[in-house]
Amino acid sequence: MQNSNNDEASVTKTTEKPPLPKRSKTISDDTHFPGPLFPAVRRTDKPFDLRVSIDSDAAASSSSLSSSSLSSSNGFNERDWMYPSFLGPHMGRRRIKVKPNKLEFKGNEEKKRIQELGSKKEEKEVASLAATQSNSVTQTSSVSQLSGRTRGLKSSLMTYYMLIINCILCVCYAIYLRDRVEKLEEENSSLRRFCSYKSIAGNNGIDVLHTDNNSDSNFGNADGRTVALYSVIVTLLMPFVLYKYLDYLPQIKNFSKRTKKNKEEVPLKKRVAYSVDVCFSVYPYAKLLALLFATIFLIIFGGLALYAVSDSSFAEALWLSWTFVADSGNHADRVGTGPRIVSVSISSGGMLIFAMMLGLVSDAISEKVDSLRKGKSEVIEKNHILILGWSDKLGSLLKQLAVANKSIGGGVIVVLAERDKEEMEMDIAKLEFDFMGTSVICRSGSPLILADLKKVSVSKARAIIVLASDENADQSDARALRVVLSLTGVKEGLRGHVVVEMSDLDNEPLVKLVGGELIETVVAHDVIGRLMIQCALQPGLAQIWEDILGFENAEFYIKRWPQLDDLRFEEVLISFPDAIPCGIKVAAEGGKIILNPDDNYVLKEGDEVLVIAEDDDTYAPGPLPEVCKRSFLKIPDPPKYPEKILFCGWRRDIDDMIMVLEAFLAPGSELWMLNEVPEKEREKKLTDGGLDISGLMNIKLVHREGNAVIRRHLESLPLETFDSILILADESLEDSIVHSDSRSLATLLLIRDIQSKRLPYRDTKPTSLRLSGFSHSSWIREMQQASDKSIIISEILDSRTRNLVSVSRISDYVLSNELVSMALAMVAEDKQINRVLEELFAEEGNEMCIKPAEFYLFDQEEISFFDIMIRGRQRREIVIGYRLANTERAIINPSQKSEPRKWSLDDVFVVISSGD
């Protein structure tokens, strides 16, 4: 009864949930194990009681599959299958055992609870089993891949080993045959001796024996040729074999050492190719050595091949191989298939080597020509002038330096810039200027690299000029500072001084701090700004500055004259018939230059004289001339009147210009400023620049916000009331010279047109000689007539635009970068001149002025220029030139100073005044 109940319970469980696997059964002794691919059944004689167990595998299979497995004919369960041993170790299954039910379940609710608990646990076991099976599958696949690679590696190694063994066997067999031939020769020689001793062999026999000896010798030679042939074949096959199996060598090494292969290891072929590439790149003669080695190898290899297929000796074969390599046509007279094939192969290799040699020679010549074309060769010069950088000032700078070197028959100027050499040479050729014996050498490179500086012999240059770049002022000065640092890092030291063009006056102290005593700075903005103010206050002064700064006319020179020692400066002043002394370089004060010294100063030993002369070799002191020292009535300077000046545009150093105007102008003057900078921002910029607006005593600032190229903005200003109008290169356009000049030119034309329409015409007004007969255009004539009322000074940066404006004569004078180039050239020739220029440009100290003739003479008085110089000393002035009433240009350092001539009160004189 109990058994029947158990059967009914088991059937109920079978229908409600997956079948339960049986417990393990022990296989009897008579049971045969069929193998790993067949199921094995563990059977026992005594049946066990049915017990409830939950297997993880049963949860993974469907209920239908489980039921079919239970009802199968063989009665096998999934548990009865054996895990194959060749797949690796079998992971044991975890089981969740439930206590067996000996009694019937009470109620359906308890059965459902047990089923839900069992299903949850089965899901967990299924997940763990799936992970275990995936790991086993991965291990199985990796093992199979490894075994496949191992089989491929073993097969390739077997082929390689068979080739090596075959070659070794061939060589050994050849050696064996050679030994056998030697033994046969010994037996033949012994037999001949025996026959000759017994007198058995006749003449015929001896002949036969001799014939056999020759045949044996030929066989020995044939054996040696066979060995040579095999050596040639093996040598030909070895590169292909190595190329084919080169990447397997690291695998063989790792396999022999039982180490794992690194997945990131670079193949051996790539490493060999990389090593060859590095060798050819690093060592310049590697290609030549490789070609030489290839030639020697071809000669030896070809000689060995010829020796193997021909009857000639090895030495003769080597010579033939060389002739085939040197001349590919020498193989035409070869006879036989083998010699012809070998000779053609050697000739083909010789042609290839000859082509490679031509390629190397062509590349070497091309590289040399390319280096010369690109300016990479070294400059072997000394006492030359070195220019670092490239800008629009370079053309005028080269002109001035060439004129300065004219007296010595020319010199050498080297330009180092970050441009192509051909482009620089083409731009210099476009100048169409005769350099008068001066050579200009261009090199491409960076002034910031010491190797490029050494390439242009920087340590042997007598002067170095650092040009400002075309960037904005701060970037340009920062680059100039880096160049100065590079120059100070030259190990050989610098022989000459360094002239640095600066863009901003505020950056000048930092460059001098870095460079020390060797550095001389020329601030381009400052030079042009001060010259514009001086030219606005004294019309015609710009032309005088152009004559003095340029080397084409008179310029400053400093030289020692021992014969002038113990003379007073008043006597020294008239001692030079072809020069005008302006100052003294005092040796006792460390070389300090004193402009316009006192008349009673006595020259001492070591003192030098500063003069204005045409050239450094055109003047010398002479005997003192006879002059009239009659005193002249000293006329005081006329009082200064308030002036009204207009600034169109905004410069970064406008605060310095205002301070200069404050020193020059009379109280009550007005300075109008028209630009696009807001008024509040203007005051902030001026204050940051160091200008005390509240401390201005002589001038009053009048701000107008507007654009100088818009006509209505200009018409809102009283343009006809200004004494001077300065058109400045605006700071916002300082990066573009063309745009800045276009803006200045447009402003100039608009102002002249507005002035010509506002000013009344005066028919009775005489037209000056400067304006007469120039142009028949009505609008140009109106603008020229308007220029007689107010002075307009234009700042034009490009020299081409400057020439255009100068020819049209619609502006009184145009200041451009050409004046800066002149100053740079003068300081490069003599750095002491920089002190003179700094004092003359400053608002304090000595200055260059234009004075009327009534200060020095009477109308139509006939006196010499020396007499006028003596009268000028009464006013503490040095007269350096004059401008006659009927001429356009002033004459500086006139000739024939001792000859008297008539003067007019309409004439003016150029003097250096103390400014007191």
Image (cartoon, rainbow, N blue to C red):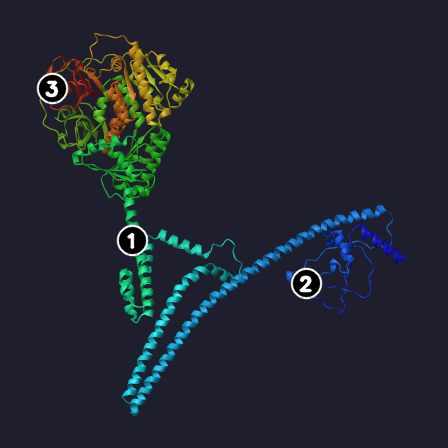
Task: Pick the residue in front: 676 or 703.
Answer: 676
In the displayed structure image, the side of residue 64 where residue 602 appears, left or right:
left
Dividing the picture into quarters, in which one does residue 374 lie? top left
In the image, residue 251 lies at what x, y percent?
50, 60
In the image, residue 325 lies at what x, y percent?
29, 61
SS assignment at label 2 = loop
Task: Pick the residue in front: 769 or 290.
Answer: 290
In the displayed structure image, the side of residue 376 where residue 278 appears, left or right:
right
The amino acid type, in three-letter code, at marker 1 is Leu
What is the spatial separation of the Cα atoms under label 1 and label 2, in whole angstroms?
A: 73 Å
Residue 96 seen: no
Q: Which mark is residue 426?
A: none
- Image height of 537 relative to 432, above or below: above
In the image, residue 680 lies at what x, y percent?
42, 18
> Residue at label 1?
358
- Image height of 15 relative to 392, above or below: below
What is the spatial separation of the Cα atoms under label 3 and label 1, in whole angstroms?
A: 79 Å
What is the spatial separation of the Cα atoms under label 2 and label 3, in whole angstroms?
A: 136 Å
SS assignment at label 1 = helix
> Residue at label 2?
37
Task: Pick the residue in front: 702 or 156.
Answer: 156
Label 3 vs 1, first from the N-terminus: 1
Label pair 1/2, CB-CB below 8 angstroms: no
Task: Pick the residue in front: 488 or 555.
Answer: 555
Instruction: Name the mark nearer the viewer: 2 or 3.
Output: 2
> Residue at label 3?
864
- Image height of 294 relative to 615, above or below: below
Q: Residue at x 26, y 15 (%)?
A: 780
Q: Residue at x 47, y 55 (%)?
A: 267
Residue 859 seen: yes
